[in-house]
Image (cartoon, rainbow, N blue to C red):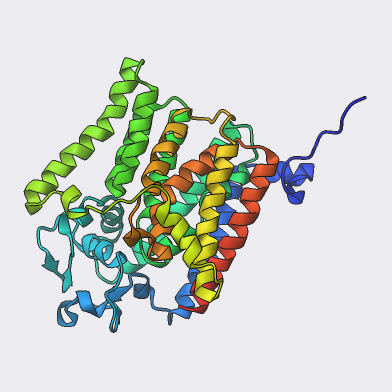
Amino acid sequence: MHSKRRAPGPPFLRMPKLRAALNTPLAAALIVGVLYGVFVVALWNARGRDISRFVVAGELGVDREQLPEGLTVLPNSAGYDGLAFYRLALDPFTGKKVDFGISLDTPPYRHQRIGYPLLVWLLSGGKPLLVPWTLVLVNYAALLVLAYAGALLSQQSGRHALWAVLIPLYPGFVHSISRDLSEPVACAFGLLAILMAARGRYTLCATFLTCAILTREPFLLLAVALAIVHLRSRPRRYVFLIPIAIYAAWQVILTLHWGTSPLQAGAQPFTLPFTEYFQVLYENRAFRRLARLHFSQALYLGIVVLLTLLSWRRFPAVPGTRIAWLLYLALASILGPDIWAEDVGYMRILSDLMMVSGTILLGASVRLRTVWLVTTGVLWYYLAAHLVEYS
């Protein structure tokens, strides 16, 4: 007797013609583009159709009289990190702590993450009226790249392209695009590097890794992981050392430029492994509105980590991703209380861990991928709706 072959994936993927038509990177990018497009337009409308409010500029960190035209400032607010990216997008080669009426709180630490604002500066020419729009559009484009590159990786793993939409639909990216933060761009570069490694195009991989590291320095861990995997191959080993060397050189340049090391300026306290994570779950167990949001997001992170562990025996498209995942998990486990104090903090900072988890989960069983699909879809919608409603 022949056993019935289980149809792979959700019901809409069980129709052969539709399944084949949607099995393209373009379809994945289109779906992600529509979802984030609706969210961005809804949030822009809820914020009074003022694109500069995505910067989240607070009056406590600016001089209103010196600010560029068109930047809305929130009263009685310290603002958020998007203000630093906005400032660097006006002049990525700055040597001033205060310029354009905006003060950089830790200049060398902010300046080391130059990738995102440099892209915005190149596309906008640093024009104050164009920068707020370009900050949002670059992040939006990065999410499309995540979908497209993820779909190619998914197909290379023998999976349907649409499973890859779950990588850019990581709910933390909703926070990032709503506040002009750098995680979507960094993860897009990181995923492109993984895709190039899977295809054996190691020079391009090193190039994208360098861009990822200059956008968010934790991607140094991915470079280290790939270098470890290729230790026995001399040409490949040297290729993966290039991003690490460029990172070291950039640190030296910024130290000489600002007089303080970025590592010293951005130093964070560490704690015992996973203590702060479980503290978030415990403190938000009451499940009121904000507590429910915190609890759901923290629980989601734990579920994705568990799903990744359950998929561990599946061979990923790029062997180094498992080493990178372990390094990212180890770092995430010891993050201090300042990071876990608010959902924006831990959801955005763990985006690299979740992106690497996604590349591993593409090779997971149908049941595990279905759990990933349901949890991601529900939380993404819940968080997006929450941000629009309470904008």
Task: Provide residue 76's location: percent of width, then percent of height.
Answer: 28, 83
The structure residue drawn at horizontal position 57% and vertical position 61%, both measured from the top left corner, is: 379
Does 372 appear above or below 344?
A: above
Image position of 169 (left or right of 69): right
Task: Provide residue 294's location: percent of width, then percent of height.
Answer: 49, 66
Q: Nearer the viewer, residue 301 or 22?
A: 301
Does 155 appear above or below 218?
A: above
The structure residue drawn at horizontal position 62% and vertical position 46%, both measured from the top left corner, is: 162
Is residue 84 visible in the rendered image? The answer is: yes
Figure quadrant of the C terminus: bottom left
Does 104 appear above or below 74?
A: above
Image position of 385 (left or right of 80): right
Q: Nearer the viewer, residue 357 or 276?
A: 276
The structure residue drawn at horizontal position 42% and vertical position 67%, both measured from the top left corner, is: 178
The structure residue drawn at horizontal position 80% and vertical position 37%, both measured from the top left corner, is: 6
Q: Residue lying farthest right?
A: 1
Image position of 257 (left or right of 243): left
Is residue 36 visible in the rendered image? The answer is: no
Q: Nearer the viewer, residue 120 or 366?
A: 366
Does 158 appear above or below 118?
A: above
Picture quarter containing residue 126? bottom left
Q: How many marks?
A: 0
Task: Provide residue 136's location: percent of width, then percent of height.
Answer: 39, 63
Figure quadrant of the N terminus: top right
Task: Provide residue 318's location: percent of width, then percent of height.
Answer: 48, 29
